[in-house]
Image (cartoon, rainbow, N blue to C red):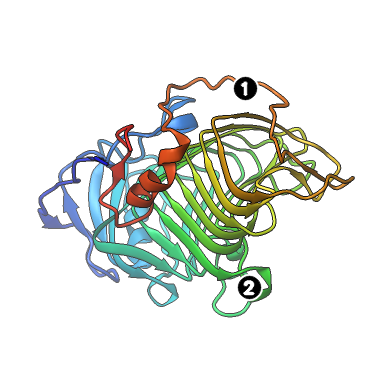
């Protein structure tokens, strides 16, 4: 199988731009803010370009990431932050400035726009340190690993979410990331990819989500239905108990994802949510699609999916599985163009392309 490799991000280091900060931060000429272009719903509502056209800096600590945000002319000045090394509690502190609103103990992207965070070199690992996006727009996060973020125990960060978004968030593209935990809520972890409180136009692509009780939610309660227009494609969900994702209201599109060992439930469409589920491969899993743990149902449109060793519960008042022979209960038209890989090819394609450190490879449509 041949894969198309996106061109590597290149820029020559020029001068030391920010001194006396923890971690090396250097200035380079303006360049493309990310490798490749946004896909899915992140292309809508004006599109998602991150820090394209702005300054590029290098950061090796969380403090340096915050310093780069705070060193901009304004909170909307475009910037690409190249990140290399391990970012953790020991090297992440609050930085103040007119163009930022940061905090210690997490990477805080609050009340800002036009930012790309791009893992480079030997890799960028956010270790026990979550990324929080709040009241922000036009953000790209690419080629990073976020692992073992806890909401209880020590240390804690970001409410236990690897990447979390809340309150009036727009146009986010998260691509080629690895998001992982080491257990469920009992072990102190929460969601890997959570969206709530009016978050819209988001794409999660070519990423790996694994070893967690909760993959992610869209909407924090049955009455919090302001979140919508989310695309999930070419991702691998592995050893997840539930929420791949949990949808409360809104519209989401899942295509060409590989779901392996969903232990309790998978795509949970409820509270009127509508999920378009195309050409995915579900394997060794239980109740991969339906309405679960509520009597407030959601809906789905299905086509081209493969169900390999999937088991289904009997329907009841609180559980309405879509299987064993899933049929569409709604129709959904998405406003963007996309190409579907055949479901039979999805495990191979996703294994070669998804996650951080994969060379930012994408599918070329063949298997």
Asked whether, in this view, residue 71 is left or right of residue 249, the answer is: left
Asked whether, in this view, residue 313 is left or right of residue 288, the answer is: right
Look at the numbered disc 1 and give the secondary structure of its residue: loop
User: Taking 315 as reference, is 249 above or below it?
Assistant: above
The crowd level at tag 1 (other Cα within 10 Å; few <14, some 14-19, many 20+) is some
**Residue 102 visible from this viewpoint:** no
- What residue is pinned by disc 1? 332
Q: Which residue lies furthest to the front in this view?
A: 309
User: Which of the marked residues, 2 or 1, is nearer the chain's N terminus?
Assistant: 2
**Whole-percent x and y of residue 138?**
43, 38
**Whole-percent x and y of residue 348?**
37, 47
Q: Residue furthest right?
A: 317
Look at the numbered disc 2 and give the secondary structure of its residue: loop
The crowd level at tag 2 (other Cα within 10 Å; few <14, some 14-19, many 20+) is some
Asked whether, in this view, residue 30 is left or right of residue 90, the answer is: left
Q: Residue at coordinates 46% horizontally, 47% vertically from top-left?
A: 235
- What residue is pinned by disc 2? 188
Q: Which residue lies furthest to the bottom in this view?
A: 154
Residue 226: which disc? none
For the N terminus, the image quarter is: top left
In depth, the one of 55 and 249 nearer the eye is 249
In depth, the one of 261 and 356 nearer the eye is 261
For the C terminus, the image quarter is: top left
**Residue 56 visible from this viewpoint:** yes
In depth, the one of 239 and 27 nearer the eye is 239
């Amino acid at each position: 199988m041949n894969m198309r490799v996106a061109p590597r991000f290149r820029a020559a280091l020029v001068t030391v731009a920010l001194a006396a900060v923890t971690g090396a931060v250097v200035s380079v000429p303006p360049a493309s803010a990310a490798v490749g272009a946004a896909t899915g719903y992140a292309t809508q509502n004006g599109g998602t370009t991150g820090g394209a056209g702005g300054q590029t800096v290098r950061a090796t600590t969380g403090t340096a990431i915050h310093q780069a945000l705070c060193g901009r002319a304004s909170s909307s000045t475009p910037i690409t932050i190249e990140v290399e090394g391990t970012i953790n509690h020991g090297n992440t502190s609050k930085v103040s400035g007119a163009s930022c609103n940061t905090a210690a103990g997490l990477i805080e992207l609050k009340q800002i726009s036009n930012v790309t965070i791009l893992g480079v070199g030997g890799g960028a690992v956010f270790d026990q340190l979550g990324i929080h996006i709040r009241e922000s727009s036009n953000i790209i996060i690419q080629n990073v690993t976020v692992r073992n973020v806890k909401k209880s125990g020590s240390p804690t960060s970001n409410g236990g979410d690897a990447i979390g978004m809340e309150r009036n968030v727009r146009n986010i593209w998260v691509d080629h990331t690895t998001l992982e935990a080491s257990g469920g809520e009992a072990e102190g972890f929460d969601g890997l990819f959570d969206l709530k409180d009016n978050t819209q136009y988001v794409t999660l692509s070519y990423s790996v989500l694994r070893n967690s009780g909760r993959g992610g939610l869209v909407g924090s309660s049955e009455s919090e239905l302001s979140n919508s227009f989310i695309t999930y494609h070419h991702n691998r969900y592995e050893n997840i108990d539930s929420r791949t994702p949990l949808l409360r209201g809104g519209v989401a599109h899942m295509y060409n994802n590989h779901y392996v060992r969903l232990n309790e439930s998978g795509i949970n469409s409820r509270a009127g949510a509508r999920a378009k589920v195309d050409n995915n491969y579900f394997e060794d899993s239980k109740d991969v699609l339906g309405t679960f743990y509520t009597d407030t149902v959601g809906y789905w449109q299905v086509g081209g999916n493969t169900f390999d060793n999937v088991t289904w519960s009997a329907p009841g008042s609180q559980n309405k599985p879509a299987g064993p022979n899933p049929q569409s209960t709604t129709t959904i038209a998405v406003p963007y163009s996309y190409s579907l890989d055949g479901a039979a090819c999805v495990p191979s394609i996703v294994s070669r392309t998804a996650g951080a450190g994969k060379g930012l490879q994408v599918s070329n449509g063949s298997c």
